[in-house]
Image: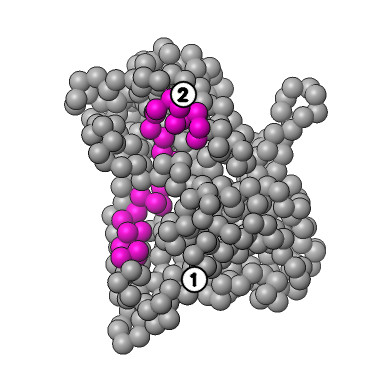
Amino acid sequence: MRTRDSGPEHEPVPVVLAGARGHGRWHLNNLRGLAEAGRVKLAGVCELRPLDAAELDGFEADDVVQSADFGELLDRTGARIAIICTPIPTHTDLALVAAQRGVHLLLEKPPAPSYAEYERMAAGVAEAGIACQIGFQSLGSHAVSHIRDLVRDGAIGEPLGIGAAGAWARDEAYYRRAPWAGRRHLDDGSGTGRTVDVVDGVLTNPLAHAVATSLALDGATGGDDLTAIRTELYRANDIEADDTSCVELTTRTGSRVTVAATLCAELPDEPYVIVHGSRGRITFWYKQDRVLVQRAGHGPEETVHGRTDLLANLIDHLATDGETPLLVPPAATGAFMRVVEAIRRAPAPLALPADAWSTVPADKPGVVRRVVHGADGLVAASADGLTGFAGLGASWARSGAEASS
């Protein structure tokens, strides 16, 4: 399929944003900056309830077309790029609506709720010949290539494995913000009782970057790069999905990757990834682009790195006829989607016993959040020792993790 032309070389690229509230506000703010730089024009917004003037501050509101019909909006605006930041179950269908019109994509993570849906999306994108970037912003960090270079050059000796830790907090209102929040499945609205996959767990959505960044640092990003996946899925909140979980991964090269995360932290902190070596370690706080190298015979070395914005990278890719490579094409998220699929197919997360958690006041008046006792230490110990919760002796952890390959 022919894709939409960019117009004159230096004209702003017309962009449509589908999903401008919730996390979509981040994209709206990013578009403001790129619009001020003359790189984009916000041509349209797809929302069930139109944005008001305050929400469109910084844009020419009269020039922004709004519609709840994504396809119709793309047709009316002639957008060249669409950003999709809508509920997880809608990602594939909306991506294909754009692909059929030759509109290039920035598709928010996770790209799909199942591996089958991911493959359907990727096949449709490839057939249409459009460019598609998956929204793992951490993979735009220049620290990723810096760390790979350090490991390749033997800075920390022989690589021993990668561990990631995420200790965040989400209050109970977080799971009431949308019908799909905290769900594994959702009624498809057809009235037939059929459901669609959601898989809104801690490792597949809020802390998905910890998984994707760990895999990228290992170089195991393709759909065939994992040979074993073991999951430990738990929940303290009254939800269907998991909020305190761990995955242990084995790659086809024999590398070990462990990611542990919770949304029930006692003291929420920045998530990080540790690359372990025989003579040292590299810690990467991926939201801060900050790297700490600790190795034998050297003092600690800390550096902060730049970051390439993924939408800007997509624009550069189009402007150079593909000479500028996409940082996160669909193929670079295949291993991540294998993890999503393993979590989707795993038994329902185990509810933690009542004595394993308690409630504390949240930041909002009258709202509480649930805290898993010792969760912060557990996820840190997992990243340090490349071990799951059961292996660390958590009193509530089952002795055998669910395994798939």
Question: In the picture, residue 16 is in which quadrant?
Answer: top left
Q: Amino acid at mark 1?
A: Gly
Q: CA distance from mark 1 to mark 2?
A: 39 Å
| 299 lies left or right of 336 | left
What is the x, y in percent for residue 6?
Answer: 27, 22
Label 2: which residue? 98
Q: Is residue 169 visible?
A: no
Q: Residues within 10 Å of mark 2 (few under 14, many from 20)?
A: many
Compared with residue 246, is residue 123 higher up or lower down, i.e. above or below?
A: above
Report the residue at 48% width, 50% height from top. 222
What is the x, y in percent for residue 205?
Answer: 57, 47
SS at mark 2 in the image? helix
Q: Is residue 5 visible?
A: yes
Quarter containing the C terminus: bottom right
Label 1: which residue? 161
Quarter containing the N terminus: top left
- Part of the protein shown in magenta: 122-149
Mark 1 vs mark 2: which is more N-terminal?
2
